[in-house]
Amino acid sequence: MYKVYQVQGGDTIERIADLFHTNTDTIRRLNGITGSVMLRLGSFLIVPVEEDNLFDTYIVQKGDNMYALARTYNVDYDMLLELNGLDADDYIYPGQEILIPKKGVKMYRVKDGDTVESVSNNLNTDYAELSKYNKNLFLMPDQILFYQ
């Protein structure tokens, strides 16, 4: 599983890799980081949390764009951008790795006032299913939950 991590003061790629029990090459590959780079405080990185069956990776080809990838894989465009730590005006480039939810994996953006019960009822699932795919169920507005 992957999560979005917000860079804190003093963070380095090495420290973040240690924090998530991975290596710097994985962090760099997931985020398209090449060469020596200074991490910006408050910026976001995709980090692996643990193995799962929620996502496939797609290697960007020349001419690809996020809108076309969202249509091809039948995924909400805005959520695909957020999942990959991108804004609508960000460029993607050949060789970049993009996370694509596997077929049947759905995403839900938490709204203000949502409860586990209301979300479970709305998504026709239960707490056990939600917690299976989501390590943190804080239900903060704009949090993305995954379910099948």
Image (spheres, rainbow, N blue to C red):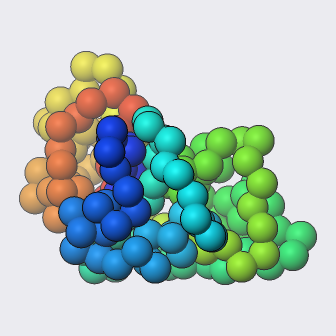
Asked if residue 1 can be seen in this view, the reply is: no
- Left or right: 106 with respect to 99? left
Name the residue: 24% across, 69% down: 18
Q: Residue furthest top?
A: 113
Q: Is residue 90 above or below residue 53?
A: above
- The x, y position of residue 67, in whole percent, is 76, 54
Q: Is residue 15 above or below residue 4?
A: below
The reply, left or right, for residue 141 in relation to residue 30 is left
Query: Which residue is pictured at 71% across the width and 79% down the height?
Result: 95
Image location of residue 25, percent across then percent down: 46, 79
Q: Nearer the viewer, residue 60 or 19?
A: 19
Q: Quadrant of the N terminus?
A: bottom left
Pick the residue in front: 27 or 39: 39
> Residue 110 is drawn in which quadrant?
top left
Q: Position of residue 131 (x, y in %)?
A: 15, 57
Tell which of 121 and 24 is nearer to you.
Answer: 24
Name the residue rendered at 51%, 70% in the picture: 28
Q: Is residue 91 visible to us here?
A: yes
Q: Determine the residue positioned at 25% across, 19% down.
A: 113
Q: Quadrant of the C terminus?
A: bottom left
| Left or right of residue 72: residue 147 | left
Q: Residue 5, relative to residue 49: is it above or below?
A: above
- Tally the numbered discs: 0
Indicate left or right for 99 with 93 as reference.
left
Q: Residue furthest right?
A: 63
2 in relation to 56, above or below: above
